[in-house]
Image: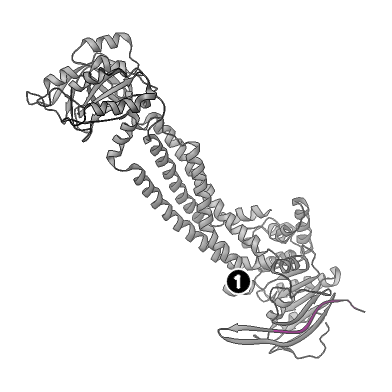
């Protein structure tokens, strides 16, 4: 038996209560780990293809269109190496719940600009050749069982066709694999010309221009130059890195950071109350035993340390298990989940800040009971027993 | 000439109850010699337990002084007083006060956690103490698995494990039947006679007091007998 052993024995003396408190702490840190890992994926990356490219959208809002003529004007800039365009289709497969990230694209330049998308040469050639060709991200193809050569109907909830229908027919030309940018595996792309000709309205307008510059280090200057070209026009532009654009896209659902802060904060306040109450109760129940320990020579400081250690252990056991589960869940979601959370993981930074929160939780929930235990004199302890 | 172990000189003790001060001892003088087995009797509220608390350094007098082996202990700091209790005094309570989540051996080992002894030495000493009280075969049992008499014997083993000079027992048989009480009292007698432990026992039970070498009667904060050298 050691002093640590004594703390451990105290911790598990009421197993059900201990388990329930640990479970509450576990859930709080599971939530914390997963949400923080998710938030990290929504932050704009500073490296990789998304950081290298620029996206030009309508300054009012990225849902507003731009004239297709802008693409050539941008291509004409000497700093621009390549440019392509994409238009949001609002697509789904058969039923609205089978939502798809689908774009009408300028097919050849699209594949050039998104050079990280891997497509076998014969599939690329088939796609370029077939006006109704469509390339499908691997994860979507796997999910719906689409294969090269399939004939698939996609419906749009935005663009009705001239004939009044909303179904566009496509031939699967290729399957995109893109380990470097998993979003490529979660979207479909087809010929803008086919879409533009078939849709009932919005002809010759596009959603956004994707720009690859000669020198990514000069992207800020190029972005300013592009926006300056269209200032005071009917369609002013806003140009930012693709990474920043994606982060802004995710913010459509609300301020993710703020939501996460509120959720984690609410969880922690709740856990704080539960764990704090449990510790207060546990120490109050043991007032007589604390009196005995003091009688046989345990100092007030030692009692304080024991009670505080107990609450620290509570927080650390529950918290570490929760964080470990969060790491597992995040790693799974990062590989098997949708593309916008690709690479999701509990980083060392998240783990470290989680550890800090555990220590804080242990300190806050343990300090008052430990202080009370330390201050209780032996006579009072026996009188309360 | 007998050696003096504890001395109370002009000890005063009063408790505060709201704004009022309630005196327990106005002037108490007492001397306990080493090797004594003293029973203290008296009606409820006479100050028996308060006296025991003062002797054991659990409580402090409001006036006067207490010396243990010639050293004042009433003015020690909290931590030094705790060290004094750990090193020199063993306590036995009416309701045993064992830790329910620990085994008998672990309960006995508890005071040794405050010493510098290693784990093996602590275990050996705890085993010896349990052997003295005849409970070696119950070492791995938790208090809930022991009878009242067995629990009190574990408490006695805990009280003697650090080899204190003074053992203070507060109604040690108050929760036991006559037969078991006699066993416990015989054990205290044996600790006094064979191991030289000085024992001060508070009791309501005249039968129990007969096991002591001397009995003092306390009433309203005063000894009613004149011979106060135990």
Disc 1 packing (10 Å; few <14; some 14–19; many ≥20): some
Relative to B62, residue B58 above or below:
above
User: Is residue B138 on the magenta stretch?
Assistant: no
Residue bounds of the magenta highlight: B1-12
Position of residue B100 measured from the top left corner of the image (x, y, whole percent) = 61, 61
Nearer-the-camera pick, A381 or A134: A134
Q: For this view, does A361 lie left or right of residue B84?
A: left
Nearer-the-camera pick, B222 or B186: B222
Residue A286 at least partly seen? no
Considering every residue shown, the one lying at the far right of the view is B1
Relative to A21, residue A337 above or below:
above
Residue A303 at least partly seen? yes
Relative to B20, residue A61 above or below:
above
Q: Which residue is mark 1?
A: A381
Position of residue B47 measured from the top left corner of the image (x, y, whole percent) = 68, 84
Q: For this view, does A199 lie left or right of residue B218?
A: left
Colour pattern: one colour
Residue B89: quadrant of the picture: bottom right
Q: Chain of mark 1?
A: A
């Amino acid at each position: 038996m050691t002093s640590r052993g004594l703390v451990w024995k105290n911790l598990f003396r009421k197993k059900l209560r201990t388990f329930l408190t640990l479970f509450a702490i576990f859930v709080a840190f599971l939530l914390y780990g997963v949400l923080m890992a998710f938030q990290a994926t929504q932050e704009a990356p500073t490296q990789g293809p998304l950081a290298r490219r620029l996206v030009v959208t309508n300054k009012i809002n990225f849902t507003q269109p731009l004239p297709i003529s802008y693409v050539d004007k941008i291509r004409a800039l000497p700093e621009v190496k390549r440019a392509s365009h994409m238009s949001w289709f609002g697509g789904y497969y058969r039923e609205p719940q089978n939502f798809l990230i689908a774009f009408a694209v300028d097919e050849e330049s699209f594949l050039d600009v998104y050079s990280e998308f891997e497509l076998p040469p014969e599939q690329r050639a088939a796609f370029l050749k077939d006006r109704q060709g469509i390339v499908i991200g691997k994860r979507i193809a796997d999910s719906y069982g689409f294969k090269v050569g399939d004939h698939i109907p996609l419906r749009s909830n935005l663009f009705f066709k001239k004939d009044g229908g909303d179904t566009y027919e496509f031939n699967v030309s290729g399957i995109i694999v893109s380990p470097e940018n998993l979003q490529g595996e979660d979207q479909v792309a087809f010929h803008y010309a086919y879409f533009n000709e078939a849709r009932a309205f919005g002809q010759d307008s596009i959603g956004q221009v994707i720009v690859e510059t000669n020198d990514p280090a000069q992207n800020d200057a190029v972005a300013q130059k592009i926006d300056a070209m269209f200032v005071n026009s009917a369609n002013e532009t806003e140009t930012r890195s693709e990474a920043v654009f994606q982060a802004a896209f995710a913010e459509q659902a609300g301020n993710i950071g703020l939501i996460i802060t509120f959720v984690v904060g609410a969880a922690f306040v709740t856990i704080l109350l539960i764990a704090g109450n449990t510790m207060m109760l546990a120490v109050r129940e043991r007032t007589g035993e604390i009196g005995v320990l003091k009688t046989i020579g345990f100092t007030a400081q030692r009692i304080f340390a024991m009670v505080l250690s107990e609450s620290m252990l509570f927080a650390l056991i529950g918290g570490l298990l929760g964080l470990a589960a969060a790491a597992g869940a995040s790693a799974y979601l990062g590989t098997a989940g949708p593309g916008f959370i690709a690479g999701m993981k509990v980083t060392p930074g998240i783990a470290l800040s989680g550890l800090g929160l555990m220590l804080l939780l242990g300190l806050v929930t343990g300090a008052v009971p430990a202080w009370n235990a330390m201050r209780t004199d032996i006579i009072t302890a026996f009188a309360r027993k | 000439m007998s050696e003096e172990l504890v001395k109370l000189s002009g000890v005063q003790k009063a408790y505060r109850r709201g704004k009022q001060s309630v005196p327990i001892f106005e002037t108490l003088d007492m001397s306990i010699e080493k090797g004594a087995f003293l029973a203290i009797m008296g009606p409820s509220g006479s100050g028996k337990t308060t006296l025991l608390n003062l002797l054991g350094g659990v409580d402090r007098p409001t006036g006067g002084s207490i010396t243990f082996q010639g050293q004042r202990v009433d003015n020690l700091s909290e931590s030094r007083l705790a060290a004094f209790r750990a090193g020199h005094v063993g306590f036995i309570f009416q309701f045993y006060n064992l830790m329910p989540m620990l085994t008998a051996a672990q309960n006995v080992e508890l005071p040794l956690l405050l010493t510098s002894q290693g784990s093996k030495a602590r275990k050996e000493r705890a085993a010896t103490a349990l052997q003295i009280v005849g409970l070696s075969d119950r070492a791995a049992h938790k208090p809930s698995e022991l009878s009242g008499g067995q629990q009190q014997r574990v408490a006695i083993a805990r009280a003697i494990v650090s080899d204190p000079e003074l053992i203070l027992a507060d109604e040690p048989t108050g929760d036991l039947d006559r037969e078991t009480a006699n066993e416990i009292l015989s054990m205290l007698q044996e600790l006094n006679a064979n191991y030289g432990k000085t024992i001060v026992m508070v009791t309501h039970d005249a039968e129990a007091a007969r096991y002591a070498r001397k009995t003092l009667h306390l009433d309203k904060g005063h000894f009613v007998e004149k011979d106060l050298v135990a």
